[in-house]
Image (spheres, helix red, strand yellow):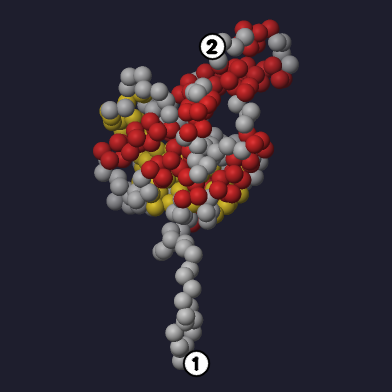
Amino acid sequence: MPFSAEIPLRTGRRALPSGNLFWHEGGRPQAETVIFLHGAWQDSTEWLPVMQRLPGYHCLAPDLLGFGESWRQGKTPYSVALQVEALHSLLSALRLHRFRLVGHSLGAWVAGQYALTYPEQVESLAVLAPEGVSDRGLRSRWRRDRWLVAPWSPLPLVLPWLGKAPWARALRDRRRCLRQSPAACTMLFQRRTAAIHGELLQQGLSQLWLPTLVVESAAADSITHQLTRTWLRLLPNPQHRELAAAATPLGVDAIEFAAALDQLQRPSLPLQTPVETAPAAAPPSSRML
């Protein structure tokens, strides 16, 4: 799919009961709409290269509440449910009632919950490096990050004294990254465990019979690979695509990702278990379809 530098991109902002949402938008408003939700440590700009490679669609990528140029109203706790309702308010205000959903990382968690909450609106779902599930091997993966940003943790106090070893520099870099996205820290590992577990998609994914594409980078790390495999195991009928790794916020090539989205087909009927009935007699020349 060729890149077109002539596709105009525009921005918008809308005040909502839960906060103020900013978004990027491109393509023809009359075309099929694709909604892009960014990852935990990014904002909507990570989707711009993909949007520019989908000239036949109406593309919209919001900053989630607390990310980029969007902000929360009041002190309502950050949660997946809050993000879902803010997104629903925005799309309702824009009169967008049928669309495809695409999510990366935390955005995939929000997209999955949105599809479960408003299934009549979502035509298809595509996710990359998806959060929102748990597995035995994933239970302690946020322990280091929690210690890096928790107010009671002594680790930030000793970081400047750990020297210039690569592992020490990596810890300092990770803490800087985390502090730039406090909303993501809150949603992923700074809430009560029961609140986080209550929003996981473990049970809900089995109910998503809509066309679902799970995309994975060829260079995905072990945690991302495990998250991907958990989604694939829980979904009833997923499609899986492995794409070439690239030095982008998404970790995959934008052209390949856009092509994969363009090829995601919608089935004419949901998959169901057939009911066995006695076949009617047919002429010898007829063909069973």
Asked if marks 2 and 1 touch (Cβ < 8 Å), the reply is: no
Q: Position of residue 245 (x, y in %)?
A: 62, 42
Q: Position of residue 127 (x, y in %)?
A: 51, 44
Residue at image position (62%, 9%) is 154
Residue at image position (48%, 21%) is 182
Quadrant in the picture for residue 96: top left
State the SS at label 2. Answer: loop
The front one of 172 and 116 is 116
The front one of 10 and 237 is 237
The front one of 152 and 4 is 152
The front one of 158 and 202 is 202
Q: Which residue lies furthest to the right in this view?
A: 165
Residue at image mark 1:
284
State the SS at label 1. Answer: loop
Q: Which amino acid does label 2 sit on?
A: Pro
Does any portion of residue 234 appear in the rendered image? yes
Residue 90, placed above or below residue 100:
above
Residue 174, placed above or below residue 2:
above
Does any portion of residue 55 appear in the rendered image? no
Q: Residue furthest bottom?
A: 284
Residue at image position (56%, 45%) is 231
Residues at marks 2 and 1, CA–CA distance in whole angstroms = 78 Å
Q: Where is residue 67 in the image (x, y as percent from the top left)?
A: 43, 26
Q: What residue type is labelled 1?
A: Pro
Residue at image position (54%, 34%) is 249
Mark linked to residue 106:
none
Q: Classify residue 163 as left or right of residue 34.
A: right
Residue at image mark 2:
151
Q: Earlier in the sequence, mark 2 or mark 1?
A: 2
